[in-house]
Amino acid sequence: MKRTHIIALFFVAVLVASLTVMLGRGFSRYENFESVYAKQGKEFTVVGYLNKEKGIDYKPELNPNQFSMYVKDDQNVEKLVVVNKAKPRDIERSEKIVVTGKMNGETFEASEILLKCPSKYKNREQQANNGKSI
């Protein structure tokens, strides 16, 4: 066997091993609050909905880079989420909230937050589906 064939075979083996490890862990690290609670101290990403009835606790005069809210995940488990970032505009209008962080006791401490806002095209799509013109 030529030296180039051996090197190419080695790289293919490394690629296959890397893919096997990635598939074993899964590509997505989305979790729910129950699974994150069991793995305290590790960082995870949770997708959920803002509990608008409980509102958002934000006091910019005390700490402009921290706010808290109650979020329900896809299993309908609600946790207090403390976000160590400035409060995003229009968070109350968001459809979904994606928070990345760690569980600390009963509180989820988020270091990152992403919002999925309602689509401005939703009404147009509904009108198009009903046969109305825009």
Image: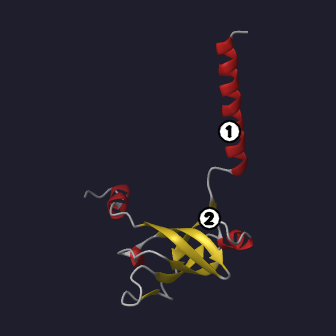
Q: Position of residue 125 (x, y in %)?
A: 36, 58
Please give the residue where the numbered disc 2 appears in the rendered image.
44
Q: Position of residue 133 (x, y in %)?
A: 26, 56
Sort mark 2 into few (<14), some (14-19) or many (20+) by Cα contacts within 10 Å: many
Return the residue nearer the eye: 112 or 115. 112
At 71% across and 69% down in the image, what residue appears?
35
Name, please, the residue furthest toward the front: 3
Can see residue 97? no
Return the disc, 1 or 2, that comes first in the chain's sequence. 1
Instruction: Check if mark 1's residue and mark 2's residue have beta carbons within 8 Å.
Output: no
Can see residue 18? yes
- As shown in the figure, which amino acid type bears the numbered disc 2? Phe
Return the residue nearer the eye: 55 or 124. 55
C-alpha span from label 1 to label 2:
22 Å
Return the residue nearer the eye: 80 or 5. 5
User: Judging from the image, what secondary structure is the residue with disc 2 in?
Assistant: strand
Return the residue nearer the eye: 23 or 64. 64
Please give the residue where the numbered disc 1 appears in the rendered image.
18
Would residue 132 appear left or right of 84 to someone viewing this image?
left
